[in-house]
Image (cartoon, helix red, strand yellow):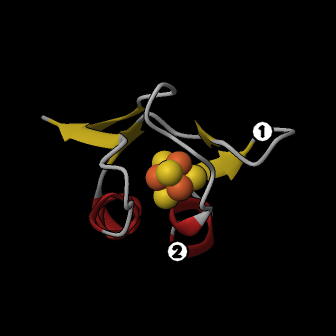
Amino acid sequence: MTHVSVDAERCVGHGRCYTLAPDVFDADEVGHSIVRIAEVSGELARQAVAGAENCPEQAITLSR
Ligand code: SF4
């Protein structure tokens, strides 16, 4: 399993993560990212990687 976290201090709300990985990330009321599912594997892990790789702020951390 891969653990997903978002650093709220870094996230500025581009929305790339929840556009690319809508099953893993969601938007709060101001468009910042929130984690829907913190422990992912398989297809959800692939979505999480896509989100992390496309975050311009390096706000997403994936750890095992
Ligand atoms: S892509 Fe990065 S900066 Fe943009 S909403 Fe997601 S976590 Fe925040």
Count the numbered circles shown: 2
Residue 41, position as x, y percentages in the image: 30, 53
Instruction: Find the distance from the CA under tag 1 to the CA under tag 2.
Output: 16 Å
SS of the residue at dot 2? Answer: helix
Q: Tell me the SS state at disc 1.
A: loop
- Give the residue displayed 67% in from the left and 43% down from the top: 32
**Residue highlighted by disc 2:** 20
- Report the quarter where the N terminus lies: top left
The amino acid at mark 2 is: Leu
The location of residue 3, given as percent across then percent down, is 29, 34
The residue lying toward the viewer, choosing from 51 and 2, is 51
Of 54 and 40, which appears nearest the observer? 54
**Seen in the image, is 22 located left or right of residue 57?**
right
Seen in the picture, residue 40 relative to 23 is either above or below; the reply is above
Give the left or right position of residue 55, taking residue 9 as reference.
left
Mark 2 crowd level (few <14, some 14–19, many ≥20, 10 Å Cα):
some
Where is mark 1, residue-wise?
Answer: 28
- Asked whether residue 10 appears in the rendered view, the answer is yes
Give the residue type that dot 1 points to.
Asp
Q: Residues within 10 Å of mark 1 (few under 14, many from 20)?
A: few
* Figure quadrant of residue 44: bottom left
In the image, residue 25 above or below residue 35: below
